């Protein structure tokens, strides 16, 4: 399940980021960064699914359809949660401290979304190198 976890770890090399989870639209955990255990990652994935659903449902408030949702940022006293669309039926959530450079982390998330999109849509290899 965590075969793209290394990509999430790579994205967290920037200062003040904490954890990352990749989840499906129905809240199933697809991958997580090394700094968070599986149980917590699964719990957060379910919560992030609800958050993206709520964000899509409120898109009309700013004159858009829910299909146009790209990212939601939630601010807390001690930090932020960034939630972004990461391909068909996939979402990326990243948590960070209150001291994070929000512009830099948003940019890094979009870079990672591009990389993940290629990984998630790439078909698996068919017996590469095996004799015919």
Image (cartoon, rainbow, N blue to C red):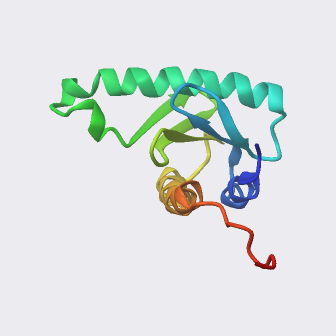
**Between residues 72 and 49, which one lies in front from this camera angle?**
49
Image spot of residue 63 (x, y percent): 15, 31
Give the quadrant of the N terminus.
top right
Image spot of residue 31 (x, y percent): 71, 43
Give the quadrant of the C terminus.
bottom right
Figure quadrant of residue 65: top left
**Between residues 132 and 123, which one lies in front from this camera angle?**
132
Q: At 59% from the left edge and 21% from the top edge, which residue is drawn?
A: 47
Image spot of residue 19 (x, y percent): 71, 42
Q: At 74% from the left edge and 69% from the top edge, which residue is drawn?
A: 127
Residue 108 left/right relative to 71: right
Compared with residue 36, is residue 104 higher up or lower down, i.e. above or below? below
Compared with residue 99, is residue 29 higher up or lower down, i.e. above or below? above
**Between residues 82 and 49, which one lies in front from this camera angle?**
49
Which residue in the rendered view is the most extreme toward the left?
63
Image spot of residue 119 (x, y percent): 59, 60
Q: At 64% from the left edge and 29% from the top edge, which residue is drawn?
A: 28
Compared with residue 11, is residue 55 higher up or lower down, i.e. above or below? above
Figure quadrant of residue 81: top right
How many marks do you count on the picture? 0
């Amino acid at each position: 399940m965590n075969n793209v976890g290394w990509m999430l770890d790579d994205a967290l090399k920037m200062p003040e980021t904490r954890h990352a989870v990749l989840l499906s639209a129905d809240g199933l955990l697809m991958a997580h960064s090394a700094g968070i255990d599986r149980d917590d990652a699964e719990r957060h994935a379910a919560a992030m699914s609800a958050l993206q659903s709520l964000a899509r449902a409120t898109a009309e408030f700013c004159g858009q359809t829910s299909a146009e949702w790209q990212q939601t940022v939630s601010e807390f006293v001690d930090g932020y949660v960034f939630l972004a669309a990461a391909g068909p039926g996939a979402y990326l959530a990243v948590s960070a401290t209150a001291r994070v450079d929000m512009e830099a982390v948003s940019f890094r998330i979009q870079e990672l979304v591009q990389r993940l999109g290629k990984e998630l849509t790439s078909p698996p290899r068919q017996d590469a190198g095996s004799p015919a």
